[in-house]
Image (cartoon, rainbow, N blue to C red):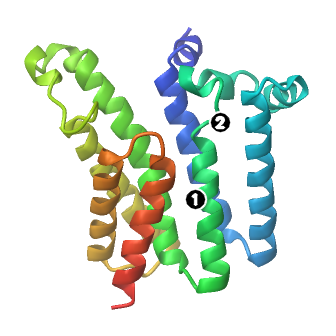
Amino acid sequence: MFIEKISNNVELMRGIWHFTSVFSSAIIFYFSGPFALWLFMGFGVIFAAFDFGRSRGVGWMVSVIRKLTGEFFFRALREKERAHVSTSCHFILAGIVIILSHLYLGLPREVIIPAAMFMAVGDPMARLIGMEWKRNGFNGLVAPELRKKCLFGKKTLIGSASFFGFGLAAAFLFCAVAKLNVAPFVLVIGALVATIVELWSTNWDNFTVPISSIAVMWALVQI
């Protein structure tokens, strides 16, 4: 019953898919050398190709995705993604840019991993908490008139605050566990930039958020 309830909630499924894919990508990146990173990029390109085929109704590609993920991937798709590539492809494109920058421009892991944590934890928490705020007001604790107030478009203040708070906490925790030497102010500025960009982004936040926060943190660590 509980599993069925989760599987029927598109936004919750998206949150689980988002966290799982981004967090696992960060773990793989942390432990991988150059050759493994090239393989990782290759896998990303293959996934994007299959997702494009899925969006165009290529039967055998749809079957392969369904065999690998069951209905999980399909239930996490929004209606507008069913005939288009999913936003996961935007993250894959960002990942390719990031990995190539790491391999050839010296982009450090110390700024890549925190940006991944902003996305892995901050983004789904912002979505789920923001939707709970607007739909139920946390079981009526929030007045109906307050639920309708948004910062930009459909983005709420509590959603953006959740993105910043949970994303920053996840980045601090991962850096502490992995012993990544990153100054706290760099993480705070990175999380703030990620939050602002996420607030103003629409369909391409999976690309713009990590790229922008990484660029700012990279600039800060070189000062």
Q: Quadrant of residue 99?
A: bottom right
Q: Residue at x 71, y 21 (%)?
A: 71
Q: Amino acid at mark 1?
A: Ala
Badge 1 marks a residue whose secondary structure is helix
Q: Residue at x 33, y 54 (%)?
A: 197
Instruction: Classify the position of the C terminus by image quarter.
Output: bottom left
29 or 4: nearer the eye?
Answer: 29
Q: Is residue 100 above or below residue 84?
A: below
Numbered marks: total: 2
Q: Amino acid at mark 2?
A: Val
- Please indicate whether residue 211 sits to the left or right of residue 134 in the image: right
As drawn, the label of residue 85 is 2
- Please indicate whether residue 212 sits to the left or right of residue 140 in the image: right
**Label 1 packing within 10 angstroms: few (<14), some (14-19), many (20+):** some
| Residue 94 appears anywhere in the view | yes
Q: Residue furthest bottom?
A: 223
Instruction: State yes or no: discs 1 and 2 in contact (Cβ < 8 Å).
Output: no
29 or 173: nearer the eye?
Answer: 29
- Please indicate whether residue 92 sits to the left or right of residue 123 in the image: right
Q: Residue at x 34, y 39 (%)?
A: 126
Return the residue at label 1.
Answer: 94
Marks 1 and 2, the one that precedes in the sequence? 2
Q: Is residue 113 above or below residue 63?
A: below
Q: Position of residue 69 (x, y in %)?
A: 75, 30
**Label 2 packing within 10 angstroms: few (<14), some (14-19), many (20+):** many
Q: Residue at x 82, y 26 (%)?
A: 62
Q: Position of residue 56 (x, y in %)?
A: 76, 27
Q: CA distance from mark 1 to mark 2?
A: 15 Å
